[in-house]
Amino acid sequence: MGKVTPIKGRYEAGFWSEYNPTPPASQSADAEINSAGANLRNWARYLAKNSSIAKAVLDARVSKGIGTGLRYEPMIRNRRGDLLVDLNEQIKQAHTEWSRRVDVTRELSRQDVEALVWRDWDTVGEVFARRVYRGRTAQQIGYQLQLIRSEMVPYHSWNGQELRLGITRGDWGEPITYHVTPYAQTSSLWSLLLPNQQEPVEIPADEICHLRRQEELDATRGVTLFHAVIFRASDIAEYQQSHRRAARASANLFASINRDIGADLNEQPPEYAGPDQSQLNLMDLQIIDYLREGESVNFHAANHPNQNAVEFVNQELRQLAAACRVAFSWIAYVFDRAYAAQRTELVHAWEMIYQDRAQFVENFARPCLYEEPLRMALLEGRLPARLMRQADPATLYDVRIDGPVMPSIDPLADRKAGELDQQMGWDSRYGIIRRFGRDPKYVDAEREKDDFEPATMQQQNLPLETNTDDEAEP
């Protein structure tokens, strides 16, 4: 037999060695969430309530993703493709009126719901919302939302292929019903009731909106944004707390007495009438003149926190920020870098925000906070029929949904870029106005007022300053 040539080309990580141990065998996403999902959710909620780092991440993502609320701009057109300005304005007014109270408790506005849902979406990885129709009133559209915490759809609901992790799916995997634990918002003890103490209620899938952070193909439920950095965030908090405690201890004056070997501790120094040295109390400007022969006092200086602690924590925060899709400066408030570095970090972090906002809008904001209220407004006859007859049915639910825009580090350069885009036809004036976070309609209204008043005054030969005490001659 010839000599066997060993295989050289192979995946090294696919073979065990004492330096590269074999990782645990992977399972399906649902099996892993079923075993670890509750602990991940509990850890995430604990960090959100007790970790300043996790709170900084959540606050930064909500402020950048939602801000003071998303902006909804209806884009209904006629059959010629022209925007129906009057109809779009009517829909916008009706949507603004409905946005004042959108949940079943009648306490939360649309902006509040958007911020709370985004925060819980990041914290535990998923949010459930139920579409509820409670009857129309003269002022309010009858459609409202019931926000449901992830805990109310228990993981333990599982009977094989049909019901998995609280969701019944069809042959192709589409959701059919959701098993929700009933609870009352008016009860102060609902959060203490464990899911296995009550029988879940089946709710049809067309009544439920499930916004989840899906990390794998076959995942039925979402996972928290912090799933890869839970222990890192906890360790950073404990590390900082240890340094704070050491600094507090070192801030107190600490001293020790050195003695020669064989010194007699019972012997008192000559002409000493004070207390025993073991009860030495130091005071301001105190002179220590009762030491024995061969004794000396050593004062210990504070050495906490460690001089490398700040850079170590910053390096850990950079890793955490990268995993949580935020900028390091947003959570550490460190802005001592060059313009190019700040610009690169800002652009990269906002790409993550735009990507997450697109998912938030597509899976929650658009279907639950715009299309369903508009459908109910049409059914209730709140929109003028004359304008509705002009609309192209294919564009009836067209809408542009925008949020906060990336701030400018160099505003002059960004505005020059916007001017160039408009001159070259790469963007419209309205698009550039929205790029800077303004509403084109209000900008045009303000410009008309600004352009009208000075021109009118000049035509009438009136002074521009009107706050003078001198009366004008007839």
Image (cartoon, rainbow, N blue to C red):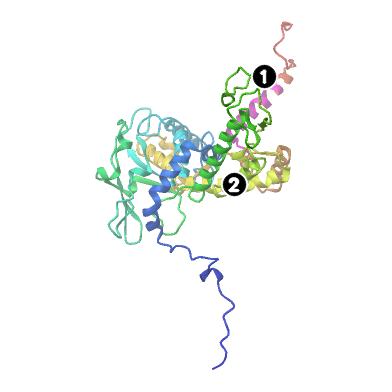
Q: Residue at x 53, y 33 (%)?
A: 68
54 or 113: nearer the eye? 54
Does dot 1 land on a helix, a strand or a loop? Answer: loop
**What residue did someone put label 2 on?**
316
Mark 2 → mark 1, Cα distance in angstroms: 45 Å
Where residue 180 sits: x, y (%)?
30, 45
User: In the rendered image, is residue 400 in sight?
Assistant: yes
Locate the N terminus and report the quarter of the image it occupies: bottom right
Q: Which amino acid type is shown beneath numbered disc 1?
A: Gln
Question: In this view, which residue lies farthest toward the bottom?
Answer: 1
Quarter holding the C terminus is top right
Q: Nearer the viewer, residue 412 or 148?
A: 148
The tag earlier along the polypeptide, 2 or 1, is 1
**Residue kind at label 2, given as amino acid type:** Glu
Q: Nearer the viewer, residue 78 or 73?
A: 73
Mark number for residue 286? 1
